[in-house]
Image (cartoon, rainbow, N blue to C red):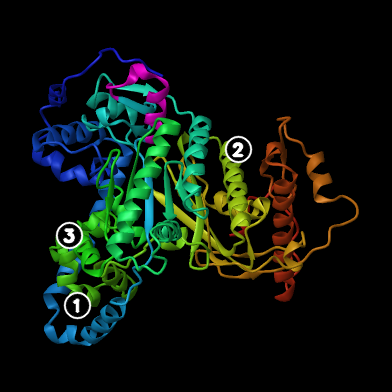
Amino acid sequence: MTDSRKEKAEPASLGMTPKETTTDEAMDKAHLFHFTGWKAGTEMEKERKERINKIIYEMSKDSQYFQQAQKNDEKTRKKIELMRDKIKVTRPGNLASVTVAVDKYVEMLEDVDLSQIYCVVDMDMFFAAVEIRDRPELRKKPVAVGGMSMISTANYEARKYGVRSAMPGFIARKLCPSLIFVKSNFEKYKAVNKTFTDIFKEYDPGLKATSLDEAYLNITDYVDEKLRLESTLLNRPDKHYSTTERYKMASSIVNEMRQRVFEKTKLTCSAGIGPIKAIAKIASDFNKPNGQHMVLGKKETVLKFVRALPVRKVPGIGKVQEKILKDAFGVHCVQDIYDNRYLIYFLFPEITGKFFLRVCMGCSNSFADAFSSSDEGRKSISMERTFRDLRDFGLICNKLAEICHSLAKQMQEKKIRGLTVTLKLKGSDFKVRNKQVSLKRAIGWDGGEICSIALPLLRSLRPKSLRLLGVKISNLTSETESKDQKRMGASNLVLGTGKQAVISTFLKRPKENSPTDCANKRISQSENAIECPVCGQVLLLSQGNTLINAHIDLCLNQDVINKLGHRNEGAPAAKRSKKPKSLKDYF
């Protein structure tokens, strides 16, 4: 923790921006930074916002992040120009081909189910609130949880100065010289999370928590049961309750729930209530902090609420999509999308066009699959970790193993597997690279097996340094694991990025000189690592025997497959080089 030098900094200090940066220049580049957008507690007058953007721009313009952001922005600009060109040559006759399809789809969406009552609860500035609760002297002072490299949460006092989550700490300190940094304590946050989650489960035992500070509840049954008991007490067991009465009860229940959370944790939370998860999620931001907002489950109310939303408020519409809609089509809110629905549907891919129509009709659960009671609709599952310029390849491999094992635990809990493994990297230049493999059989419950697939991808990309590492498994299936999938000798690889050759060779381990025995004989100079006897890669003992054996099995399988391939072509089997091979040789 870094204590502040001053008790309070005047917002006027935001004017200490180098003269060479103009207001127009800074404002023009503001969209390149994800931490300059709207968030609860960041409402401010135009002049202060301009000063904040100047400081952010001046301190970031020479960074690799900014350079990469500019390149990405240029790609977006070209997309916008291309879309504008398409709009110019589009005639009313062209739209006739999609008019019928759009009208039919909209008609189908008219019959959306609005009978459920969802509640999304979001703890207010959760990490910061916990720290301030435990350190009362921090009240009314600007506080950020994190450090000079990155901030995870900032309190509302800090947000007045433009400090935001996911902002580098050194920029935050420039914006607010009196900012107090507090080191994060996730064990404490998890303990507090369990406390209020136990309260939420009384209202919905099947709630879905997407993070430590947010939960999605379906309170329909709880509301209806409360009303049933009320009608029994009134000797009116057959009373039918209207939508307005049901939502009035829901509002009372959510208010009671929030009060119980405060009494138990001394922390406030905000909530949104609505007939669809996405609407409840959006509504949870409307009355922050320590408030709630309700969208009545009536068609006209839902449409009025949704159509007035700025497009960036819609889950599933990111800053790139927002910029394309705004600069190419002149779209600012959802109503604008609906007014231009034929043109948008005609020029965008069909899947995107249908998504926009669902948004306009107020029935878009763009992320509903992730919070449904089953995982039938889920398309993928992933896990990522961010770092501060991680360069040690051994540590990178360790992080990959941790991610794979954590991902496997989640997949086993959800009883799902997948047929495609994607590795995601972000380097110090902030370029994002992906590489994937498709598999012949589904995997997902064995972290070592996932890592044995992801490890060659990592080696092939050869990152010099990392800021982000992630693994995603897609093409999911909920089928139970078969006996064949449990056989340890199965190599299950289809090379991605242009090399779609299936490898499915089942090997028997030799009784003598097993891969593990060979590996143990080749202990590297480090007492904590061994070398793979096939590719020569250093394997950390901390990764565990499962991961080490899986890696060696994979290398041996691929080596044998290469030899078999040569023989099938009539060529003699290749001799093993004395020089240790890199896994890149197999790609």
On screen, 7 above or below 411? above
Could you say which is closer to the camera, residue 415 or residue 78?
415
On screen, 266 above or below 339? above
* Quarter of the figure with residue 308: bottom left
Label 2 Cα crowd, 10 Å radius (few <14 / some 14-19 / many 20+): some
Residue 96 rendering spot, x and y as whole percentages: 18, 87
Where disc 1 sits, the SS reads: helix
Q: Which residue is mark 1?
A: 342
Q: Which residue is mark 3?
A: 308
Query: Quick one: which residue is furthest to the right in this view?
Result: 511
Q: Nearer the viewer, mark 2 or mark 3?
A: 3
Could you say which is closer to the camera, residue 62 or residue 190?
190
Q: Residue at x 36, y 34 (%)?
A: 153
Q: Are marks 2 and 3 in contact (CB under 8 Å)?
A: no
Dot 2 amino acid type: Gly
Q: Residue at x 35, y 62 (%)?
A: 276
Q: Residue at x 55, y 66 (%)?
A: 476
Where disc 2 sits, the SS reads: helix
C-alpha span from label 2 to label 3? 51 Å
Q: Check residue 132 for magenta coloring.
A: yes
Label 3 Cα crowd, 10 Å radius (few <14 / some 14-19 / many 20+): some
Left or right, residue 539 beside residue 213: right
Q: Check residue 569 for magenta coloring.
A: no
Residue 301 rendering spot, x and y as whole percentages: 22, 64
N-terminal-most mark, 3 or 1: 3
C-alpha span from label 3 to label 1? 19 Å
Query: Quick one: which residue is furthest to the front in this view?
Result: 235
C-alpha span from label 2 to label 1? 53 Å
Residue 135 rendering spot, x and y as whole percentages: 40, 19
Residue 77 visible (yes or no): no
